[in-house]
Image (tube, helix red, strand yellow):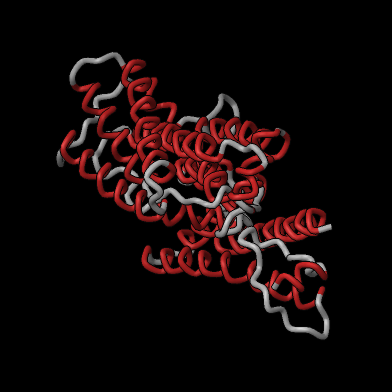
Amino acid sequence: MSHHLNIRSFARWETLLVLVLLGLGWLGMRLSPAFLSAQNFANLTVAEMEIAITAIPMTLIIIAGEIDLSVESMVGLSSAVLGFLWAAGVPLWADVALVLIMGALGGWLNGILVMRAGLPSLVVTLGSLALFRGLASVVLGPRAISNFPAQFTAFGFGNVPRTPVPWPLVVFGVLAAIFGLVLHRTWLGRQVFAVGKNQAAARYSGVPVVRLKIGLFVLSGVVSALAGVILTSRLSSARADAGQGMTLAVVTAVLLGGVNIFGGSGTIPGVALAIFTLAVLQNALRLADVSTELQSISVGLLLIVSVVVPNAARQVALLVRRPGRRSSRPLLASGAVQSAPKPEEEAAR
């Protein structure tokens, strides 16, 4: 029963996001006649694609009950290493391969510290956020590398021929489809949800919790490094400070998409809708000449709303299911509404 309730709940949340997206689209049309142009569509999507790509593995990590705050510094480190290797004369294909391997190693380090050393992921990834950013500064310093091949830079801001679809959007679509199928249609996805809902029960059921979470951190590192390569391509420049401030937008997109901050529930389609909602909102604010500071405030408010509203809705659902009595038990970490305790559980308590 609770499983079906969760599905309906998130379906309603995604429906709400669609309505919000339509409302923002109407606002954009009122603000500027260029809003619906193909060029504006390409601009508003390509500007968010690094955030969108990084948000995909972040979705799985948060569903599993952890968090990775180091994604933006991995983006910067991958950009810095890519530029350093290219300036040193290493072929570009080898640069990209080495950067992805480096991303996997960075994610593995996070996973080992969280799962083997038993440290909170919030603290570990906050530390690696500073570590990776510092390494990027050591590798490249304040300089920028910008003499990349035209074919490489064209990928970052170019469109699929005869369409307004940017190439990074294609990458996001492919990754979202793959991760969505894995999360919602395979045993591996069921394990991710199980670990996020109750890690101890999942371990007793035979789920390899340690390997699973380390693998998720590795995936996050690899995809963040890929986002750094795409950002370098789009900006036609490798810099140590690339991706700075991205983590807030990534976490906002994931939580706005309906993923429970405590783990155990969420959907890839919801996160995709949230990403486009953020993209349209920021584009509409830019068309209205709203300052960057106010745009940042709007993102912060969305982050608060994306946490408060779903949890308030779950509290209301709990009260509706238990009329006439006040619950003495907290909600599950997954955010799902608990069923009424059995008589033997009441006796044990």
Locate residue 185 relative to residue 216 in the image: left or right: right
- Image vertical order of residue 2 relative to residue 234, above or below: below
**Which quadrant of the structure image shows residue 14?**
bottom right
Task: Please state, as top left, top right, bottom left or bottom right, where the C terminus lies in the image.
Answer: bottom right
Q: Quadrant of the N terminus?
A: bottom right
Q: Residue at x 34, y 37 (%)?
A: 235
- Does the image show residue 164? no
The residue at 29%/14% (across/down) is 91
Residue 188 vs 338, above or below: the answer is above
User: What percent of the width, then of the height, locates residue 306?
Assistant: 58, 64
Of 143 and 70, which appears nearest the observer? 70
Q: Position of residue 97 (x, y in %)?
A: 37, 20
Q: Is residue 181 left or right of residue 148?
A: right
**Percent x, y of residue 338:** 74, 65
Q: Residue at x 60, y 30 (%)?
A: 174
Up-down relation of residue 255 to residue 58 (above or below): below
Identify which residue is drawn at 54% across, 52% down. Answer: 65
Vertically, is 245 above or below 147? below
The one nearer the camera, 210 or 14, is: 210
Looking at the image, can residue 224 be seen? yes
Name the one closer to the observer, 100 or 82.
Answer: 100
Residue 72 point in image, percent of width and height: 36, 46
Is 277 left, or right, of 239 in this rendering? Answer: right
